[in-house]
Image (tube, rainbow, N blue to C red):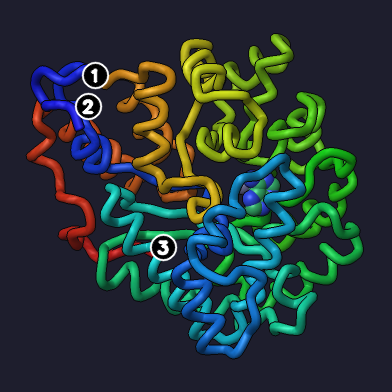
Amino acid sequence: MGDRETGPYGPAVDETFLRGIPKAELHVHIEGTLEPEMMFGLARRNGVALAYASVEEAREAYDFADFQSFLDLYYEGMKVLLHERDFQDLTLAYLQKAAGQGVRHAEIFFDPQAHTDRGVPFETAITGIRKALVEGGRRMGLSSRLILCFLRHLSADEAMRTLQEALPYKGWISAVGLDSSEVGHPPKEFKEVFAEAARHGFLSVAHAGEEGPPEYIRQALDDLGAARIDHGVRCMEDSTLVERLREEQVPLTVCPLSNVRLRCFPSMQEHPAKRMLDEGLCVTVNCDDPAYFGGYVAENYAALREGLGFDRDNFRAVAENSFRASFLDETEKERRLHEVASYFEDQRGETAQPPGTASSRPPQI
Ligand code: ADE
Ligand code: ZN
């Protein structure tokens, strides 16, 4: 770790500073926060056999040749999640980790079809997650939103059935999203499902332009009405699209470690995050599936510093963008933006609320 005043990245951009930046996390799959230690613990608790002999063996297997090889292990790992308590423990562990990294607000994806398809009721998953989110608000002052993702490798009809199942829990879900294997599953296939979700008052987001072409980003905006694009990194291949994203300030929830680990880019040095910021795009930085990709949000910030030379101004921009792009109300956004400003205006970042402490106002969930 570099010295705060004289370190290789200039003053006050060491790991402690990066962890302390007040930030929102807008792209994290709760199932992707299942660390091997917890996977083994839940396997024991639930009597589930795992494909790995040890935690170390599981970690060694996380060397992905491509996106599908990741998804195979991701769906395999979550088989240990059976009971409400499992979902609650998983979510609470993530919130604790996030709060320790300066996260004040988290918008969390869950994949109900990955659970209902193996016989775990929708209610079990969502109730466990919800209980942890309420507890996180109370204990850590961390506000949150829940986003239901449809698995795009399954059909639009199945997504529609999942939406119907979700309706009794509408009050707990802010938005719908679209994830899983992108190539060959364009957003437009889910147009009707998203229109129906909008009729019920859900906001929408969608993974697009991670592995798929820029055209999928356009479809996510035009056919699904996405308020944010998850990843969106392939927009840089299409200058007309870049212009639109800049003009409309469409938030892009970028996940650098994920993109490198899934071989979207050969190295962090070749990741477009810095060019995207320089183009005036609304870039936010997130962790995607931190248990599988080697780090939570602060490790993603550090990777951008090391790989792309992100400086204080860049970090301030992405932290501010994270709150602007969130589904918080305007008053909460202003409060959090003020917190970011005071953190950066104090060279040592010591006036801001330390990570993980309860806020002076009641938590918003
Ligand atoms: N599900 C979990 N992680 C994902 C990712 N990076 N892209 C698409 N679907 C996912
Ligand atoms: Zn994702």
Residue for point 36% across, 59% down: 143
Residue at numbered disc 1: 9
Q: Residues within 10 Å of mark 2 (few under 14, many from 20)?
A: many
Quadrant (top left, top right, bottom left, bottom right) of the N terminus: top left
Q: Nearer the viewer, residue 140 or 269?
A: 269
Q: Residues within 10 Å of mark 1 (few under 14, many from 20)?
A: some
In front: mark 3 or mark 1? 1
Q: Amino acid at mark 1?
A: Tyr
Q: Are marks 2 and 1 in contact (CB under 8 Å)?
A: yes
Q: Amino acid at mark 2?
A: Val
Label 3 CB-ligand 1 distance < 8 A = no
Q: Is residue 188 above or below residue 121?
A: above
Q: Nearer the viewer, residue 268 or 148?
A: 268
Residue for point 52% across, 86% down: 44
- Image-based side of 1 in relation to 307, left or right: left
Q: Nearer the viewer, residue 163 or 271?
A: 271
- Is tag 3's residue or tag 1's residue first in the polypeptide sequence? 1
- Is tag 2's residue or tag 3's residue first in the polypeptide sequence? 2
Residue at numbered disc 3: 94
Residue at numbered disc 2: 13
- Image-based side of 195 in relation to 330, left or right: right
Q: Amino acid at mark 3?
A: Tyr
Percent from the top left, x then y, of residue 145?
Answer: 49, 59
Q: Secondary structure at mark 1?
A: loop
Residue for point 59% across, 78% down: 81
Label 1 CB-ligand 1 distance < 8 A = no
- Gap between marks 2 and 1, in whole Å? 6 Å
Q: Secondary structure at mark 3?
A: helix
Q: Quadrant of residue 30?
A: bottom right
Q: Secondary structure at mark 2?
A: loop
